[in-house]
Image (cartoon, rainbow, N blue to C red):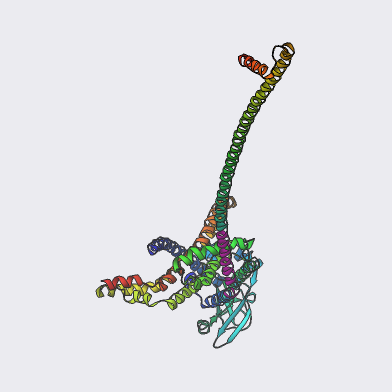
């Protein structure tokens, strides 16, 4: 029965050693260990939170960037379109202006040509008539005494004359 | 739900304990019978022979029961190896007090393994008894002073007491170094010894204390629960080591488990809330007639809970030691018949002991876990406030 009978001596020593060990550990070991664990758990959860926040921030930044990029792209497109339009407008304007100028110049030239031609024809007519008169004067000096009769005679003849 | 699970765990464990107690009782009966017969033969020897010689010892028949019990119980010296006079033992201090003779302090080596008296005392089995002769003589000629023996207070630093001291020292330095690591490496990953202990500390904290005592109170009990858990586990493991610092059956000693259980009982009782005592003495919502039956059961259960804790740990660990020793005894039993038989059986014995050793490693952890788990369950029950219960009754 010795196996089943508690001995007070051993109970005494058990209380003494276990008690000393318990109080020493309670004072020097367990609080440090448990606080250390808690501290680490806190820092880990903090770090995880920070990582999560950073990730969210990154996602936000990324979407922002994309938005900005898209905006820039569309802006570029409009700018390009505008530039193209402006270019076309300028070209068209220049073309029409040039056309108008050309037309104007052509008309002017035509008019000038016509007037020059008319002047030249008139000049030619006058010269031819005076030449003819001179010739005719020389030819028919005697027959026609008054120059007025001669002029009337030439003019009648010129009127009958047709160029072309 | 939580308590239901705990209850079923309790039931299963109780069943196991019951089986072990029966087994133990049988083992004990066998051992007692054999040790009695040894005493008889010893008495016969004394009657016929006047001197005690080594030859008589050599021919003494191997007594497995006595051997096993000798290895499992406490002793006044720490036997390491060898037999009889050639054995290597560590002498331990004997501290003894009697009202007639006063305080005595001397080393157990003076007893010469129980063969001599010293200073008016001698060893009888594992007990120190007072003898009439004050000078050192052969123990077999001494006459026991029964009156003084009955009043003797034995506070000797026995093998178990010494072993408890050693394991407490181991624990202290172990956790002091772990604590230092936590102090030095704040917020960093654990390393070395610290990472070995950390999962266990977290296990006790999260799975044992927090779940059973509750978020509010668990911190207060953690130092005790951790100390108990690691004390039991370390000593269970040390008990499995066959050489010097180990091999003692501390957690399988009834005095040790009794002390732990009483501590648990005291803490539970001191922390009992009004609700806890209400549930013990007058379970709310139960008719008065039923209370007559229920209250005695509840009161009994207050004492039964720590008692079960005490017996479970004691029985499980002692059973483990007895099983291992029984296997080894087989070698010597067969060895006595023939040397070949001894060698033959040793093969099976070693195989079985390795298997049992592996099982005991599990049991060592399991018993530490179960003791701590139930302790925190009892603490939790003592601290639980039944506010929701009270509201339910108000509604009625």
Q: Which residues are magenta?
A: A24-50
| Majority secondary structure of magenta residues | helix
Of A120 and B247, the residue lying toward us: A120
Please, is residue A139 above or below residue B81 in the view? above
Q: Is residue A63 above or below residue B390?
A: above
In front of the other: B253 or B153: B253
On-image quarter of the N terminus of chain B: bottom left
The answer to whether residue A44 of the structure is visible from this angle is yes
Residue occupying image coordinates x 38% and y 78%: B274
Q: Position of residue B138 (x, y in %)?
A: 61, 76
Res A164 quadrant in image: top right
Q: Is residue A95 left or right of residue B299?
A: right
Q: Is residue B250 visible?
A: no
Rendering quarter of residue B195:
bottom right
* Nearest the eye: A102 or A9: A102
Please tell me whether residue A164 belongs to the stretch shown in magenta: no
Question: x, y percentage for residue A150?
Answer: 67, 16
Which residue sits at x=33%, y=70%? Answer: B389
Please name the residue shown 57% across and 72% down the image.
A31
Q: Which quadrant: the C terminus of chain B?
A: bottom left
- In the displayed structure, B141 sits above or below A164; it is below
Residue A28 falls within the magenta-colored stretch: yes
Position of residue B123 in the picture relative to residue B9 (left or right): right
Q: Position of residue B126 (x, y in %)?
A: 55, 73
Quarter residue A32 falls in: bottom right
Percent position of residue B194, x then y: 62, 63
């Amino acid at each position: 029965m010795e196996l089943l009978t508690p001995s007070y001596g051993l109970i005494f020593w058990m209380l003494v050693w276990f008690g000393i060990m318990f109080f020493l550990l309670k004072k020097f070991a367990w609080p440090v260990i448990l606080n250390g664990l808690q501290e680490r758990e806190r820092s880990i959860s903090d770090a995880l939170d920070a990582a999560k926040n950073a990730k969210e921030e990154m996602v936000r930044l990324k979407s922002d960037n994309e938005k900005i990029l898209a905006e820039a792209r569309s802006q570029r497109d409009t700018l390009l379109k505008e530039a193209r339009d402006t270019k076309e407008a300028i070209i068209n304007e220049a073309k029409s202006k040039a056309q108008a100028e050309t037309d104007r110049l052509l008309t002017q030239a035509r008019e000038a040509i016509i007037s020059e031609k008319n002047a030249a024809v008139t000049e030619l007519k006058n010269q031819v008539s005076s030449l003819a008169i001179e010739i005719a004067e020389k030819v028919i000096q005697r027959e026609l005494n008054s120059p007025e009769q001669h002029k009337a005679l030439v003019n009648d003849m010129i009127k009958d004359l047709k160029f072309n | 739900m939580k308590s239901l699970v705990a209850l079923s765990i309790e039931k299963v464990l109780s069943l196991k304990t019951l089986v072990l107690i029966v087994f133990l009782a049988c083992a004990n009966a066998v051992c007692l019978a054999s040790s009695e017969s040894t005493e008889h033969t010893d008495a016969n020897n004394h009657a016929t022979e006047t001197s005690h010689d080594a030859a008589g010892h050599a021919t003494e028949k191997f007594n497995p029961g006595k051997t096993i019990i000798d290895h499992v119980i406490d002793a006044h010296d720490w036997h390491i190896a060898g037999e009889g006079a050639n054995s290597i033992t560590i002498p331990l201090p004997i501290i003894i007090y009697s009202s007639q003779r006063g305080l005595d302090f001397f080393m157990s080596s003076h007893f010469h393994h129980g063969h001599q008296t010293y200073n008016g005392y001698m060893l009888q089995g594992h007990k120190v008894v007072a003898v009439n002769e004050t000078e050192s003589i052969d123990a077999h000629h001494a006459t026991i002073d029964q009156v003084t023996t009955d009043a003797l207070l034995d506070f000797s630093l026995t093998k178990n007491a010494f072993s408890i001291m050693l394991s407490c020292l181991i624990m202290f330095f172990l956790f002091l170094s772990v604590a230092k690591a936590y102090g030095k490496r704040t917020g960093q990953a654990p390393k070395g010894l610290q990472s070995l202990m950390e999962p266990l500390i977290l296990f006790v904290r999260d799975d044992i204390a927090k779940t059973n005592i509750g978020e509010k109170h668990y911190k207060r009990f953690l130092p005790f629960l951790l100390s108990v858990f690691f004390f039991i586990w370390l000593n269970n493991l040390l008990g499995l080591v066959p050489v010097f610092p180990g091999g003692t059956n501390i957690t399988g000693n009834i005095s040790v488990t009794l002390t732990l259980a009483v501590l648990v009982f005291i803490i539970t009782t001191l922390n009992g809330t009004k609700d806890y005592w209400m549930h013990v003495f007058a379970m709310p919502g139960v008719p008065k007639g039923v209370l007559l039956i229920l209250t005695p059961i509840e009161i009994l259960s207050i004492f039964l809970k720590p008692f079960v804790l005490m017996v479970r740990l004691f029985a499980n660990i002692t059973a483990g030691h007895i099983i291992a020793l029984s296997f080894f005894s087989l070698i010597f039993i067969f060895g006595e018949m023939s040397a070949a038989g001894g060698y033959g059986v040793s093969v099976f014995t070693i195989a079985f002991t390795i298997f049992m050793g592996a099982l005991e490693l599990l049991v060592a952890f399991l018993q530490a876990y179960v003791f701590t788990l139930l302790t925190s369950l009892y603490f939790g029950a003592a601290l639980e406030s039944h506010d929701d219960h009270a509201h339910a009754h108000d509604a009625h």
